[in-house]
Amino acid sequence: MANLSVALAGLNLKNPILTASGTFGYGQEYEDFMDLSRLGGVVTKSITKEPRAGNPPFRVTEVPGGMLNSIGLANVGMEAFVKEKLPFLRKIRTRVIVNIAGNSVNDYETVVSRLDREEGIDAYEINLSCPNVKEGGLTFGKNPAEVFRITQNVRLHTKRPLIVKLTPNVTSIGDLAQAAVEGGADILSAINTLVGMAVDVKTRKPILGKITGGFSGPALKSIALAKVFEVVQRVSVPVIGIGGIFSAEDVMEFLLVGASAVQIGTANFINPGISEKIVRDLQTLCDEQGIKHVKEIIGKLEIHEGAVFSQ
């Protein structure tokens, strides 16, 4: 049987299948649907300094090719997470990655500093798709200088592996990747959702309460593959691919373009046991292709001679 283990800058995974933040709750919500220990790791929903109720309804709507969500980072806050959620996560035999969000640089520093006192956390994923309230609401992740600043400041508060999650809603995701790495990121994850909206033609109103939301699902895969490929060409740190992954074949596509691991997102809403299924299917797919170790295919995309990558 093929060896599915992968090593990502100090974060060693039994296989490259992780769950995407915001689609898997705090992990415990899915324990009745799968053996969580079979996964490479669980990424929690975003944790903020204070509890957040989230956005007004509607928060989620299905659209052609995927879904839109405008949850608004609803979560229990860092103190309740430590007391109510982390005890369960400590018990599962897989890697635990806590996604962190905030509305100021200090928010990110505060949450990481608080969680770094606790056992049972293997890495942090920094969600930069948040508005910087103190700077007029501009999303942190769209500005390379802000990406660098937050990463650098958070880096000072932990020695655990630091993952920076990149937004695709920019002209050059490569610039963001470079800034994150220069700021001290050990690993990058890409991509976060695209901005989208849906309209009810009967009421002539936006369907989502906040007008726009994050678009995810199968239609995102081709874009995500291109963005991951762009990031891999720009930096040398490991990259986790995210976007429209529903099968082992999808996983292999991301590995071939250079991702070292992937996250399963929207597919969890359709089949809550799909992440474990993809682990099994990836094992079968590797065995069928005579692959002895999954690392053999990472970044092994064969490019036609003379082909030029266009961003």
Image (tube, grey):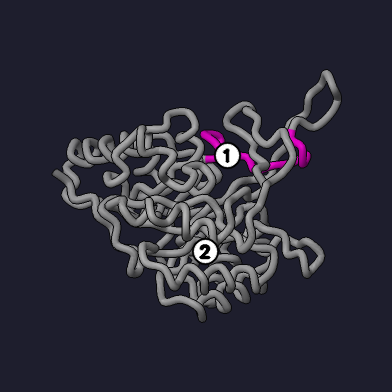
Disc 1 to disc 2, how far (Cα)?
19 Å
* Apparent side of residue 291 relative to residue 276 in the rendered image (left or right): left
User: Label for residue 134?
Assistant: none
Residue 107: x, y in percent?
Answer: 64, 69
In which quadrant is the N terminus drawn? top left
Residue 80: x, y in percent?
Answer: 53, 57
Q: Tell me where the magenta segment starts and ends, as one range.
A: 208-220
In the rendered structure, does residue 210 fall within the stretch colored magenta? yes
Question: How many numbered marks have been drawn onto this rendered protein structure?
Answer: 2
Residue 67: x, y in percent?
Answer: 60, 33
Amino acid type at circle 2 is Val
Determine which quarter of the picture holds residue 274.
top left
* Apparent side of residue 129 relative to residue 30 in the rendered image (left or right): right
Q: Residues within 10 Å of mark 1 (few under 14, many from 20)?
A: many
User: Label for residue 164?
Assistant: 2
- Would residue 81 be seen by someone viewing this image from the given angle? yes
Determine which quarter of the picture holds residue 310.
bottom right
Q: Secondary structure at mark 1?
A: strand
Mark 1 lies on residue: 216
Above or below, comparing residue 180 to residue 139 in the picture: below
Amino acid type at circle 1 is Ser
* Apparent side of residue 249 relative to residue 52 in the rendered image (left or right): left
In which quadrant is the C terminus drawn? bottom right
